[in-house]
Every structure is written in C-alpha cells, then in structure tokens.
Amino acid sequence: MSKHRVNRPEDLIVAGGGEYDQRHYEDHPELGTDLVSYEHVISPRSFELEREAIFSRCWINVGRDTWLPKIGSYFTRELEILRTSIIVVRGKDDKIRAFHNVCPHRGNKLVWEGHPGREKSGRCMAFFCKYHGLGFGLDGQMEVLRDPDNWFGSQGADLHLVEVPLESWNGFLFANFDREGPKQSLREYMGEHIWHALDDFPTELYETHVRGQGEINSNWKTLHDAFSEAWHGSTLHSEAMVGLRNVTFRAPPSRFDGPHRTAISRGTMPEGNFSFEIERIAQASFTGTQVPPARPIDAPRAAFPDGADDWVNVTYTVFPNFQFQIYRPGWVMTYNYWPLAHNRMRFEINQYHQQPRNFSELFALKSGVSLVLDNVFQDLGTLEATQRGLESQVYSSYPLIDEEHNIRHFHKTVDEWIKAYEAMSDGMA
Amino acid sequence: MYLPEQFGDLEVFVAAWDHPGTNERYAARLASTLPEMKAFFDAVLPLAEDIKSYLNALELDAFDEQDQCLARLMFAFAIVASAVEIYRQPMVPDSGATEFDMVVEPELGGK
C-alpha cells in the first residue's frame, strides 16, 4: 500500500496527522472489507431486539455526579428504549443511587411535573407520589404511609422503590437494567484500558456544565455513525470549518477494547488563523477545537503513553450509546444516542468546561455553544435524509471505506450482541 | 438607558436582540432577516474589542443590569455571526428537519 499524503501543513488544522502508510483494514482484518447491510437501521424488529439484547444488558450512561451537587439533589431520566424512567439522587449518606421512577402502590410515575414524559431535576428530602401522597426517602424506603390503618398487614409499610444498579466511571454514572442483575461490574464491562482512561484528568474540567438535546427522525445508530468518522466535516461543514476544506482526512487507527473504542486526532493548530470576524473576537477557531475559556491540558496518558505535542482530541466510545471526547484546549463533550423507535431518536450533548474567569472566556464558551448548535442542526438535518434514503431499500448493502472502520466495528458489535441474545433465547426455548 | 453610557449607540438593538438564553437568541435569529442581522452585526463589530475590555475589567458576578444587558447583546452577536458571515441566511442550510434546544448553559457568572 502506497504512502498517503495527508494534509499539507499549511492547511492542516485538525486532521489525522502526518503521513503514515497504515491502512485500518490491515490492522483489523476481523472487521473485513465487505459491503455492510443496514437492515438493522430500518427494521422495527431490530429495535425490539436491541431493547433486550443490548440496552437491557449493557451498562448505560445516565448522567454525571456533578449534576447532583448536594444531598437530596436529583434528576429523572426518561429511558423509552427500556420503557422506564429512573430517578438518580444523592442520598443523606452522600451516596448516589438510582431507582425506577414508579410508585409501588398503583404504578403511578413518581417524580414528574407538567407532562409525565418530561424530565425533572431539583432537590428534596423525600419523594411524594402525586396520586395518594405516599412518601419515599432518598434511599428508596417507605417514609410516609398515608392512612396506615387501612393497609392489609405490612403491605403498605413494606413498600419501597426498586433500585437500579449504578456505578461511576470517574463521575460518569452508568446504570444496568439486566433483570437478573449485572453480569459484570462496570469496570469488567469497560476493560482496564477504558476504565483508567480518565484517571489523570483534572476535576476543573467539569466545573461548568452545558447541555442540549433534540429529537430527529433517524435510527440512533445512524447518528453514532456520523460522529464516528470525521471525514464528513470537509464536505458537510465546509462552510464554517474553512480549515477542513479540501482536506483528505485520514484518522489514526482506533484502539478497540471489546465493544468499546478509543479514537484519537492529531494535528497542528496555527494560532490566530481565523477565517471569520467572530473567530477573531472570540479567539476561538470554528475548525474543530473551538472554545478555549481554557487552560490547555496535557495529552491524556492512556491515549498517548509517550506524550504528544500534536494531540487534538481523544474520543472514548462506550458501547452502546455513549461517547466521551476531550479536546486539547481543556474541555469535554459527551454524546448520548437514545433510541425512541427504529426511525426516531433523541440526541443529547453535554459539555464540561473550566469555570470562565472573565467575560472573554465566557464569550468564547458561548460562541462555541453557538457553533455546536449550527453544526448539530446540519448533522441532524442530514440524518433524516439518510434515514429516508435507507428506508427506500434501493440498495441492500453499503460500501464502508477504510476511514470508516469505527462504523464497521460498531455495526459488527451490534450484530454480535443480537446474535448472542438470539442464541441464548433459542437455547432457553 | 439599558446599556453602559459609552455603548449607547447599541441601545436601538436592545429590543430585538436582548434575550435571556441561547434558545431565545437562536429563535430571534431564525425569525429575523439577513439585513436585520447584518445591521446588528455591523454595529457591534467595531465595538466588540472595547466591549470585551470593558467587561473583562469587571468580576463576572459583579455585573450590574446594564453590564448584563451588554453581555447578552454580545451573546446574541455570537449567535447571529455565523448567519451573517457564513451562511448568509438565518437558518443553517438543509436543517429543516432539526429540532434541538439547550437545556443547561452558563449565563453571567457561570454555573
């Protein structure tokens, strides 16, 4: 295989980095090079299978501990794919727990406001059901039983919320919905490499929280695919990301740890190389690594054990639907892909920034949010177009290029988990 | 007077562009025309460095109401900038199927 000339240094802003003669399919022969079926992106049956085979068995990220600053702080999460809602709360013992958000008396959703499908957050010392006023403590135990003489035996006094196993990955909270209990701890599920990947990150990274979400008529895996390759940037986002125009993007090889993966970006970032007035005023580039209210951080050790002067970004993808990205200027962005139906999803972005110290830093942060919004509108708009095209079934399979090896790995993983589930179900039948 | 006196030239833009958060600012962008956004952008641009210097001299949690209004205009400036400088229209091209909202964001003083 010939050497590939990557980007010229003068137009390299964010890119694969340097010249190399590696091809991903040679590194990962197990991924193959065949055309790939997208049947599981358009099939209602696959959606049902993913509920049982994947989302009921994997550890699922549901938030972060910094969203719960005080005893009694809580938030609810709607998990349509699992047909449930959970409450995540910091208890009086400072421990964070998750409970199914359902009153055990007659099944009413316990914590909600306005519309039962809407999420809620706040702070309280007990959860009271809106229906008959039963109260449950932050540990899920019965605290206030109404009309205690009217219950049969201990049926009322014994009521309690159903706890959901919850574990933390450097503050990121993962729940497990396996009805028989988790088959593995979160650490075993992630593997040692991913488990330790964030260990050296300073807590200052998480001081300021930004969150956005939206729904789109697309399968959840299609958005995962969009954000698992960067080469669409030089076409789809070429108007804003001037530095990516005409760049042939070649990403360095990803590292696969079972169903999870680590992807890195390397490149140089010429200072002061701005294309628009807003970039100059915000002192933030639209191309890839915007937003520096920021004290740059060292190259993450797990991804760059020998250090790196040219690192730009590291993305950890925790199967099935969570991505954690850290950017060199010292900020973090996470994505959650929430399936709602085979052709509808909710997309959630969380950003974490160091606390802005002055107006310029806050302005850079806000400009970055504005840029992310523009790009998300562009990405999500394209998704519905992709879903429509796939549903036409004009083609039965698709050629993923070498650059798209992350997507190949992801779809292979989805298929493997579904096959394993079906084999287990067949065995039981 | 909604703004610090030295930035009084921007008073005429307060009614249209002073909004409490990103969602409202983005909605104002989508509801406006390119000439309206360009007029606002062109008015803020030459003052932007002075505004930053003025606000940088203050503690973020010590902004008075006029300072906060000025800061919010700058955040609106950031929202309309791409529409004016890049897309030449309010909406990002081909984003007609998209809905997306900010749920948590720092405003003045951070969070």
Image (spheres, grey):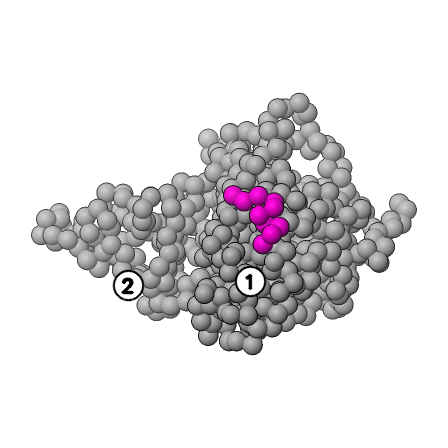
User: Which kind of residue does numbered mark 1 sit on?
Assistant: Asp
Give the vertical position of A292 relative to A179 (above or below).
below
User: Which kind of residue does numbered mark 2 sit on?
Assistant: Met
Crowding at dot 1, Cα within 10 Å, few <14 / some 14-19 / many 20+, comes out as: few
Tell me which residue sits at (57%, 43%) in the image: B33
Tell me which residue sits at (12%, 53%) in the image: A148
In-front residue for pair A420/A284: A284
For label 1, the SS is helix
Q: What segment is highlighted magenta in the picture?
A: B31-40
Label ID, residue B57? none
User: Does the CB distance between marks 2 and 1 fall below 8 Å?
Assistant: no
**Magenta stretch: helix, strand or loop mostly:** helix
Question: Is residue A166 visible in the rendered structure shown here?
Answer: yes
Residue A85 spot, x, y in % from top left: 38, 47
Q: Give the chain of mark 2.
A: A
Q: Which of the 4 image quarters holds residue A124?
A: bottom left
Question: Which residue has dot 2 on it?
Answer: A125
Give how far apart the Cα atoms at labels 2 and 1 are.
50 Å
Residue B7 spot, x, y in % from top left: 55, 67
Is A64 left or right of A130, judged from the image as shown?
right
Tell me which residue sits at (63%, 56%) in the image: B42
Q: Which of the 4 image quarters holds residue A312?
A: bottom right
Residue A285 spot, x, y in % from top left: 69, 59
For label 2, the SS is loop
Q: Give the chain of mark 1.
A: B
Whether the magenta-drawn stretch holds residue A10 is answered as no
Is A82 left or right of A360, judged from the image as shown?
left
Question: Which residue has dot 1 on it?
Answer: B9
Give the vertical position of A83 relative to B23 (above or below).
above
In the rendered image, the quadrant that contains the N terminus of chain A is top right
